[in-house]
Image (spheres, helix red, strand yellow):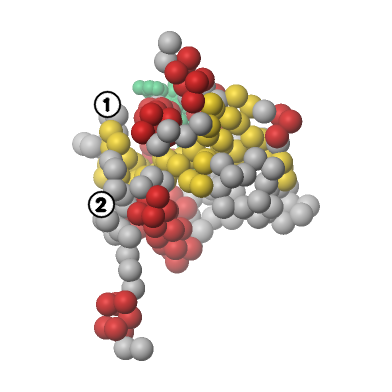
Amino acid sequence: MSTSTMAENSHSPFGTPAPTLSTERTILRQWCPEDLPLFAALNADRDVMRHFPTTLDRAQSDAIAHRLAQHIETHGYGPWALEIPGVTPFAGFVGLMRVGFDAPFVPAVEIGWRLARAWWSKGYATEAAIAVAQFAFETLDLEALVSFTVPANVRSRAVMERIGMRHCPGEDFLHPLVPPGHRMRRHVLYRLDAHELAANKG
Ligand SMILES: CC(C)(COP(=O)(O)OP(=O)(O)OC[C@H]1O[C@@H](n2cnc3c(N)ncnc32)[C@H](O)[C@@H]1OP(=O)(O)O)[C@@H](O)C(=O)NCCC(=O)NCCS
């Protein structure tokens, strides 16, 4: 197949129309090609990837960005690119993802986040995650969200707790995509039910 034919046939989800969410300081939007180098930089950062099995190279990072953008295009929601107007066009992602592996709590929709180190400790992840949870319950009409990480990921667990999620120790699990015996296999499972967000909003 010639290069031009491949280009004509290959579909890119980048920039396709999708709901955009906004908060006081942030915008959650579909991914665009300009996000790719910034996403690759954060995926290559050992601090950011401390609680994942490995850092990612550019090709791996681009493939994940494509998959996340594709999720948004397919489902109308997903792990949105996080823009902070006046600060940075791309800080990372915050959003929703259908859990794609087998576990006792699946089917489920996960809420998750990954920000470049420069944008930690400013409340951006929590602010965006609250808007995402509201969208999940009020617009998508989901009944519940889950989130999970390794026990040592205290920053991620703190975001979960700040948005009102509760740890369900009885549902902690061995991640099926992490090899048996790997120190990152055990994951803690958090939940947020629709009525809990309403209660948290008071
Ligand atoms: C998980 C992650 C997104 C959390 O980032 P974070 O900066 O700790 O979380 P927030 O953006 O909600 O910021 C909260 C912090 O900002 C502070 N803050 C500053 N200004 C704030 C404001 N206006 N509003 C709220 N909080 C504010 C809070 O006090 C809190 O401080 P702390 O860093 O001392 O705890 C980030 O650590 C990350 O990307 N990690 C790597 C990827 C990862 O592990 N993802 C999860 C996989 S499951």
Q: In which image quadrant can residue 37 be found?
A: bottom left
Is 137 located above or below residue 148 in the figure?
above
Question: Is residue 25 rendered to the left or right of residue 106?
Answer: left
Q: Residues within 10 Å of mark 1 (few under 14, many from 20)?
A: few
Q: Which residue is mark 2?
A: 17
Foreground residue, 180 or 130? 130
Where residue 101 sits: x, y (%)? 62, 52
Which residue is at a point 45% across and 42% down the rendered structure image? 96
Residue 26, percent from left and from top: 29, 34
Which mark sits nearer the N-terminus, 2 or 1?
Answer: 2
Q: CA distance from mark 2 to mark 1?
A: 22 Å
Of tags 2 and 1, the one toward the viewer is: 2
The answer to whether any part of residue 92 appears in the image is no
Amino acid type at mark 2: Pro
Q: Residue shown at 54%/55% (left/top)?
A: 55
- 90 left or right of 46 in image: left
Neighbours of disc 2 within 10 Å: few (<14), some (14-19), many (20+)? few
Residue 24: give its label.
Answer: 1
